[in-house]
Image (spheres, coloured by chain):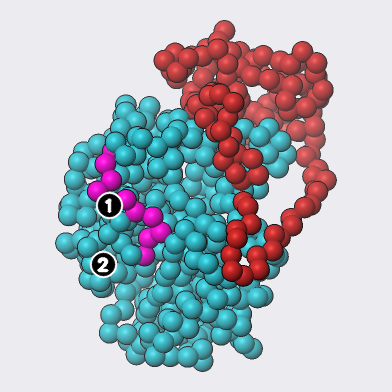
Amino acid sequence: MNRKIAIAGYRMKAASDLVTTRERLTFELTRGLFDDLGIDRDHVGTTIFATNDFLDGRTISNVFLDPPAGVYMRDESKVEMDGLSALVYACMRILSGQYETALLVAFGLCGSQVSPYLHVEYTLNPTYDRQLGLLNELSAAGLQARSFLNKFGYSEDLLDEIAARNLRNAALNRDQARGIKDASAKDIKDSSYLYEPLRELHTYPATDGGCAVLLASETKAKELTDKPVWILGMGQSIESYYLGERNLYESRSTREASGRAYAMAGIDKPEAEVDFAEVSSLFAQQEPILTEALGLYGPGDAEKAYAGDNGIAGSLPVNPSGGPLGAHPICATGLFRLNEAIKQLRGEAGKNQVKKAEIGVVHGQDGVCAQQNTVVVLGI
Amino acid sequence: MEAPAENFFTPVVPLDFVYNYRVGPYIERYLRGFKDKKILGSKCPGCGKVVVPARMYCGPCNRRMEELVEVSQEGSLENYTIGHVILEKGAIKPAKGPYMLGLINLDGTDSLLLGRVEGVSVAAAKPGLRVKAVWKEELDGDFKDLDHFEPV
Ligand SMILES: [Zn+2]
């Protein structure tokens, strides 16, 4: 990159019901972040929202968000996708040389205000899948889980282990909406099947949540904070919408995106050079699928990894925060992964803190079964 | 989602719209094929792959698929899930009973077709199981004409 870009600060908030309005949440997040950094809206060069009109129930929903975000007589734009896509866009705006700072605001209120599954029903191909009524976010995830277990000969127990680990980690983390202290694989197996082998507790919880993140050029970042976290690399890739034309047990587009991000960051051997990962695994099976695609664990290594290597105290931790099984505020989830990585890199992750945190990789996704993926490499 | 009882006014936002969605000639012909109990796929002149249901463009080749071909009504079950719930306007509701959804590779095609599967126990549901299409008795030229798949 021709300029270095850092994350200067963030605010985040999640619960099953925040009992709030979109505007109040936006104000609390952005005004809170400005206060943390000792700045006001004049320090913000450009603002980018990551929100979804369908979830907001109004078209071009960002027009209502400008006043609480302090955008007045300035430029503002929106990415109707996961917040990590908005981050890539924000970086481009800073790289253009036109701006020294960029504010990201992302939220989804699917805990209290609209069903998270409805949005995916309306993502489906309207002339075929929607007419047939068989495919939805959960049946697709059930097929993906079955494909993954069959490919590597795993039993359903592995999904229980993954979910239990994440919900235990999430219970230690105050920024999560759901956690289960001391969750065991049996607790997970006691939850009902949705689409076999997928059970209720293998899936993300309906979540209210949002975050604000301030990006800054090198000079500006050093003025704003003594703990900047640098963006070392970024990559994005998309694959076919049609599940019948993809191998659901792998994520080729994540592999492609991570290749680009690692190349930009100068990382040749991610399994040795990356210290931890925060990935947007919305369903238990996606965590090993994504970490394999990120080059952190080999295909078929999942059972060994979940025996300890990828735990908080392990050699290469994955989702030490508890991941999206603890909170999935649609549109903000990728930035939640980013913020969790910032906490790790700054040594501020408390009980979720991993031993070594100098390079972290974060991942965000959109579409059915992670059709589009964004990978960002961070360092201190 | 129900409107919650809160200490502030929470209106229900109506989103009631109808789209007249033009499906394009391939899906039209795909559905017309159903009236004759035929399953049509489209073939890419670049990679030679055949996909079902027929669609017009190949992503990897960035080419228009010119040819519609009739494909086999038999194939192999490659993947499946047992549904215990249904989703109705975003709400999870219990299903009347467990049901199987399968991804089926029809012979001679390079894609998987999603469909209901009947007469297969979970123990018997292994990748490669041979299945065939079962049609509804009265055909309407509708997606639901192809009712389900069952073992050959
Ligand atoms: Zn082709």
Please state which of residues A180 and A170 is positioned toward the viewer in this rendering.
A180
Q: Earlier in the sequence, mark 1 or mark 2?
A: 1
Residue in the picture at 56% in, 51% down: A116
| Ligand 1 within 8 Å, label 1 CB | no
Q: Secondary structure at mark 2?
A: loop
Above or below for A91 versus B96: below
| Chain of the residue displaying label 1 | A
Give the residue at x 24% y 48%.
A182
Q: Which stretch appears magenta?
A: A175-185
Q: Nearer the viewer, residue A326 or B94?
A: B94
Quadrant in the picture for residue B32: top right
Residue placed under numbered mark 1 in the picture: A181
| Total numbered circles | 2
Q: Which chain is cyan?
A: A
Quadrant location, the N terminus of chain A: bottom left
Q: What's the chain of the residue with tag 2?
A: A
The answer to whether residue A184 is magenta is: yes
Q: Is residue A358 visible?
A: yes
CA gap between label 1 and label 2 equals 17 Å
Inspect the image, locate mark 1, and give the three-letter code of the amino acid beneath it: Lys
**For the residue marked with disc 2, what is the amino acid?**
Ala
Chain in red colour: B
Q: Is residue A3 above or below residue A177?
A: below
Numbered badge on residue A349: 2
The image shows residue B11 at horizontal and vertical percentages of 69, 63
